[in-house]
Amino acid sequence: MRYLAVVLSAAAGVQAARQCSTTTGYTHRVLDARYDGPDVDKPGSDLATISVSLSSSTTPLYECVAQWPESWKGFHNVTEKLIWSDCIWTGAGSGADKSVAFAVDWNKKVVYLAHVFACSDREGTDGLATGTLPLSELDCDYTEEGSAYCIPKATSSGARPDLRISTVLAPTAPDANTASCSEISEQYQSWTLENWHRQFVLTPGSFEPKAGTDTGPSFTLKSLGVNGVTFTCAPTSAPVGPFQGECKSDVTKAAATFTFDPKLNILTVKQKWDCGDSAALETVGVGYMQGTCDRGFNSDVFTCSSEPVLIGTEAL
């Protein structure tokens, strides 16, 4: 099993929100990083597991985990888009962000970070900031079991390198009622996913949902690239994955569909914007969904939910 751990520490103290009028951006410190190769104890497994811990000091504030087939190198094999993964709040303190996500291009050894936060100086609005971190110098070796791993190269004194990642505030999203297609095409597109809901039956001793019982996911998507667009999404295919679904919005120019692979927990979102006589703008985002699934009392029915999740699109 491949494993990449990136631990980040906020450069400033934790706040309830962030200023959105800043031109200096936001800086995080990377305390540690690790990439582990395929788990030799699990024959046939080719999954890469990416883990990130975010911290305001020495206590992890967010835990981020992603998983995808090793050969994908961090990109979806069909859409060729980066796979974004949620960073879950640990409850160890008050975070400055509503949602945090990361993605990894393992071919180029680059980590991407994006976070959404309330604007302390713009009441009722949210900000989106993005940044990248090259993992340029790595030491790679094998564990005693034979699994490959990579870690950042230590300094000449043997200490961990001082790595930092800075994010920059994205431009304010144009309004859905007035935005032109040229304005939308220049905006970084992403969504906040909320109200994730999925149910299935898991009989004792089984690791897969009982055939025909998986409802597939339903959820809402709030566009961060066009202000005022919210989708309500539900599956349209039979309960045999991958699930296909539609997303409806009150904004007539906007339409979206999704695909969810329950084996890999990979969600793909495709949004189209009607540009009239010209070709429609299409945006594709991919996310690794790790919703918590709880079993009902005295029941084999599991219900899955999730905190808000940020899903990005292209490389930043």
Image (spheres, rainbow, N blue to C red):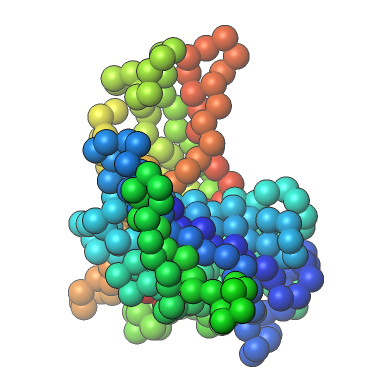
> Eyeballing the image, is 183 above or below 272?
below
Q: Nearer the viewer, residue 128 or 177?
A: 128
> Eyeballing the image, is 68 above or below 302?
below
Residue in the picture at 37% in, 55% down? 142
Residue 234 found in image quarter: top left
Q: Is residue 203 visible?
A: yes
Residue in the picture at 64% in, 90% down? 23
Residue in the picture at 68% in, 56% down? 60
Rendering coords of residue 314 (x, y %): 35, 71
Rendering coords of residue 48 (x, y %): 35, 51
Rendering coords of residue 270 (x, y %): 31, 58
With 241 as the anchor, is 226 left or right in this view? right
Rendering coords of residue 161 (x, y %): 58, 76
With 73 as the anchor, is 86 left or right in this view? right
Residue in the picture at 59% in, 58% down? 53
Q: Nearer the viewer, residue 97 or 222?
A: 97
Q: Nearer the viewer, residue 279 or 118?
A: 118
* Quarter the C terminus occupies: bottom left
Q: Farthest residue toward the top?
A: 298
Residue 188 found in image quarter: bottom left
Q: Nearer the viewer, residue 104 or 33?
A: 33
> Eyeballing the image, is 296 above or below 290?
above
> Eyeballing the image, is 230 above or below 291?
below
